[in-house]
Image (spheres, rainbow, N blue to C red):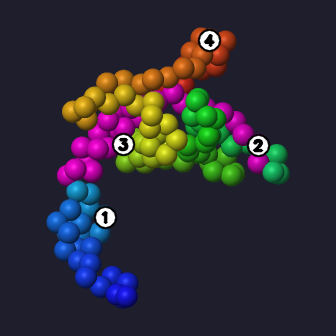
């Protein structure tokens, strides 16, 4: 019986992993690109939710699953300041990849082709909810 890790190369000896912490491999950028493009079109809308103490919080919510993706204000109603490409887009990408990746249409070359969405976009169905 061999010891755990014995005979296995260290993680940084694998070329794909040999980079500083926090740096993404070029292949990761290619794999994320379709999801980043999908994030721009992802259906979201603003909802006011009530906390346990009946205080209101403005929240941006996914129209497909009603999950909160980010808050617009803190618990006291003060607005957060976000930079879309730095703060918001990564949250939408993470949400899509965790819960809705099958709805992102990607061709064999890894290129984004569109979204497979089935929800009501009519005025009676709610706000248009698209991220811009």
* Nearer to me, 10 or 92: 10
Q: Earlier in the sequence, mark 4 or mark 2?
A: 2
Which residue is under mark 4? 123
Q: Position of residue 86 (x, y in %)?
A: 37, 48
Q: Earlier in the sequence, mark 3 or mark 4?
A: 3
**Structural distance between the alpha carbons of marks 3 and 1:** 17 Å
Q: Nearer the viewer, mark 2 or mark 1?
A: 1
Which residue is under mark 3? 85
Q: Is residue 36 magenta?
A: yes
Which residue is under mark 1? 22
Q: Are marks 2 and 1 in contact (CB under 8 Å)?
A: no
Q: Residue at x 44, y 38 (%)?
A: 101
> Over which residues does the magenta segment extend?
26-51
Q: Earlier in the sequence, mark 2 or mark 1?
A: 1
User: What label sits on residue 50 in the rendered view?
Assistant: 2
**Structural distance between the alpha carbons of marks 3 and 4:** 28 Å
Residue 118 against residue 62 in the figure, above or below: above
Q: Residue at x 32, y 44 (%)?
A: 32
Does dot 3 land on a helix, a strand or a loop?
helix
Residue 9 against residue 69 in the figure, above or below: below
* Nearer to me, 42 or 106: 106
Q: Residue at x 41, y 34 (%)?
A: 39
Q: Earlier in the sequence, mark 1 or mark 4?
A: 1
Does dot 2 land on a helix, a strand or a loop?
strand
Q: Residue at x 58, y 20 (%)?
A: 119
Q: Earlier in the sequence, mark 3 or mark 2?
A: 2
Residue 116 in view in this figure: yes
Q: Are marks 3 and 1 in contact (CB under 8 Å)?
A: no
Q: Majority secondary structure of the magenta segment?
A: helix
**Structural distance between the alpha carbons of marks 3 and 2:** 28 Å
> What crowding class fits label 1: few (fewer than 14 Cα within 10 Å), some (14-19), or many (20 or more)?
few
């Amino acid at each position: 019986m061999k010891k755990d890790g014995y005979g296995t190369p260290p993680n940084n000896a694998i070329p794909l992993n040999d980079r500083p912490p926090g740096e993404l491999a070029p292949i990761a950028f290619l794999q994320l690109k379709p999801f980043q493009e999908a994030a721009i079109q992802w259906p979201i809308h603003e909802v006011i939710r009530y906390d346990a103490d009946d205080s209101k919080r403005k929240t941006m919510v996914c129209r497909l699953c009603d999950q909160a993706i980010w808050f617009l204000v803190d618990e006291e109603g003060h607005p957060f300041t976000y930079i879309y490409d730095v703060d918001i887009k990564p949250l939408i990408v993470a949400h899509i990849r965790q819960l809705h990746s099958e709805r992102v249409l990607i061709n064999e070359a890894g290129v984004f082709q569109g979204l497979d969405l089935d929800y009501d976009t009519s005025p009676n169905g709610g706000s248009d909810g698209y991220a811009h």
